[in-house]
Amino acid sequence: MKMRTERDALGELTLDDACYYGIQTERARQNFAVSGRTIGEFPRYLWSLVTIKKAAALANRDVGALDRETAEAVVKAADIVLAGGWYNQFPLDVFQGGGGTSTNMNANEVLANLAQELLTGNKGYDRIHPNTHVNMCQSTNDVIPSAMKLACWYLLEELLGSLAVLEEAAAQKCAEFADVVKLGRTCLQDAVPLTLGQEFSGYLALIQRQKERLVQLQRDFLAIPLGATAVGTGMGTVPGYVDAVFSHLRELTGLDIKQEANLFDGLQNGDIYIDLSARLKALAAGLSKMATDFRILSSGPRAGFGEIVLPALQPGSSIMPGKINPVIPELVNQVCYRVIGNDVTVTMAVEGGELDLNVWEPVIITAIFDSCTLLANTMKLFAEKCIAGIRADRAVCREYAGTSLALSAVIAAKFDYPTGSKLAAYAREHDISIQQASVETGLLSAEEAGELLDPEKLV
């Protein structure tokens, strides 16, 4: 195995020459190995980071800060990494100290070694240096939050795609169940009738509302603090660089990326991540409530509600033959609990920023990535393996709707509340429906009762 030695201010380290990352990455790899998860598992984040490096090299070439040969080597190296298959060269743990410096240097070292190899046939930094050339006009402090924001835009794009799948599934069920009359319930007690389609329209409205709010928020992630460098003053950049780098970023991504209005704000504050996490939490809370509803409505089959039937995906017990569990709704509940927990992490990490930079960006992007990815994957499963296959037990729904004592509300509306209350007590005592009770007590004729208390006319 061929080895190479690199030196920094702390001394020397020996690395496998197959590694394109260098000494700073290796020190961080040894220092931060706590979770077993690496930056290489965050493809959108890495893509955004390397794209910024490419745009910076092009910009520095344009303004004459970087010679053409060096710039084009860095650009070509970036293209090779962006093509995929290089994730093992980003071995750093997702949790790390230093505000993302190690991640930024990981990218700088990989691109420098690869660019040098393209030019000379060997790794090393005598021709292309990770700090001098690849990191030119940049700081970790403006590159990392910029890459995070771009990554969030792409994560939201994937999330919104999954939301659209869920929206379509819910819309189809609204139409399919439009004529299924069932019993409403409030406080887990019988209430007046509605249709299953009306009930599902509530789920659909939630999905549509969350989608609209996420679309509005997504646009805000296209304002990034690139060009701020270390603290927001832009020190270390050269004239013309900022305009050039944003022009190249827009061209490379096809997105309307712009510089944040206040760069000091862009480095100090992360409230946009609280906004996003709060939206993800709201979505998760709604999805979890929906999943719980499905578990309740499908409970049984002999001793539960049994108003809907979920797709049978797998056996539900190692001891009870024939038992089928609501496994997808249970999965949804658990994912949503995790997302809601991640919101606390993001809130504390944003609040914990101090003075001129928030250094808790690694845990923020990790929590946001987890929440977006979990929700995007889970919503598609929820739509395809659960909602799309839900059936209504029309007979059960009709029976519950027709026998509910809550129909006494109709009597209260026609006569008065005490009359409705007395009739409900009579029906409960004699174990009969409100319709039967109204006839037996002489309050209504059979024809009147059939007309007034028909659940299908009450929805």
Image: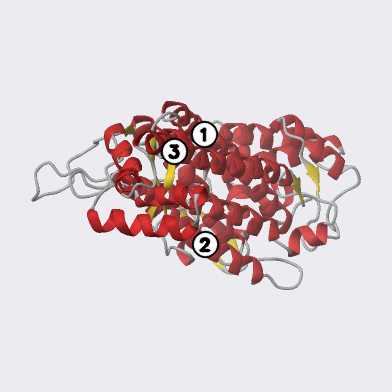
Q: Residue furthest right?
A: 239
The Cα atoms of the two marked residues, 3 and 2, are separated by: 75 Å
Which of pointers 3 and 1 lies earlier in the amino acid sequence? 1
Measured from the top left, where is residue 203 in percent x and y? 49, 42
Which of pointers 3 and 2 lies earlier in the amino acid sequence? 2
Residue found at x 54% / y 61%: 343
**Residue 368 to residue 178: above or below:** below
Mark seen at residue 28: 2
Measured from the top left, where is residue 341 in percent x and y? 48, 62
Front disc: 1 or 2? 1
Measured from the top left, where is residue 306 in percent x and y? 26, 42
Residue nearest the observer in this picture, 11 or 252: 252
Q: Secondary structure at mark 3?
A: helix
**Residue 9 to residue 181: above or below:** below
Residue found at x 63% / y 44%: 214
Name the residue tied to disc 1.
167
Specify the amino acid type for callout 2.
Answer: Ala
